[in-house]
Image: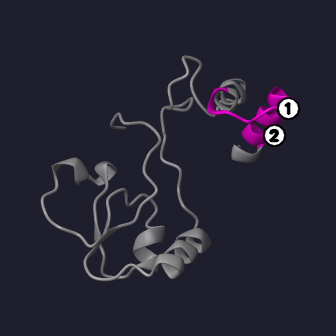
């Protein structure tokens, strides 16, 4: 769906700069976000899962070391790419926003909205 949004956004831009407003306008009719323009997509689930190949590539690029955290565990791709990292997931009742501690690296693909699921 992301590719469809970008294609439609580029059409709306008609050769001009592609700005966030055009991307949002393209996302609404495609159902990527709700009709009121909020970032919560239709259906209410804003958890976009990171594929394993992408998580591995990000970890391989940045080489996070020391104490590592994945605060939005989701499907677990970053945890698989960073064995022994700490993890939180609101869907499992572990809310990172209530966490206390220190981490050397926080690596995640956060939900698009700031509201809890």
Residue at image location 75% in from the left, 41% down from the top: 6
Residue plotted at (26% across, 73% down) = 104
In the image, farthest residue toward the left: 100
Residue, disc 1: 11
**Relative to residue 108, is residue 6 depicted above or below?**
above
Residue 15 in magenta stretch: yes
- Circle 2 sits on which residue? 7
Task: Point out the residue furthest to the front here.
Answer: 16
Q: Is residue 38 left or right of residue 93?
A: right
Verify whether residue 76 appears in magenta.
no
Residue 60 coordinates in the image, percent (x, y): 52, 81
> Residue 21 in the image: x percent, y percent?
64, 26
Element marked by disc 2: helix
| Residue contact between numbered discs 1 and 2, judged by CB atoms under 8 Å | yes
In this rendered view, identify the residue nearer to me: 103 or 46. Answer: 103
Q: Main secondary structure of the magenta part?
A: helix
Residue shown at the point (81%, 40%) measured from the top left: 7
Q: Residues in magenta? A: 4-21
Q: What is the C-alpha distance between the residues marked 1 and 2?
A: 6 Å
Crowding at mark 1 (Cα within 10 Å: few <14, some 14-19, many 20+): some
Q: Is residue 40 above or below residue 35?
A: below
Q: Position of residue 33 (x, y in %)?
A: 58, 30
Residue 44, image x and y in percent? 48, 32
Evaluate whether residue 95 shows in this view.
no
């Amino acid at each position: 769906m992301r590719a469809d949004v970008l294609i439609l956004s580029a059409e709306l831009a008609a050769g001009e700069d592609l700005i966030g407003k055009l991307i949002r306008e393209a996302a609404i009719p495609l159902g990527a976000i709700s009709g009121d323009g909020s970032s919560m997509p239709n259906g209410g689930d804003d958890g976009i899962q990171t594929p394993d190949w992408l998580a591995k590539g990000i970890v391989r690029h940045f080489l996070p070391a020391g104490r590592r955290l994945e605060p939005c565990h989701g499907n677990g791709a970053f945890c698989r790419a960073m064995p022994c990292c700490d993890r939180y997931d609101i869907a499992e009742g572990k809310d990172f926003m209530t966490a206390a501690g220190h981490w050397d690296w926080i690596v995640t693909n956060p939900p698009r909205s700031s509201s809890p699921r």
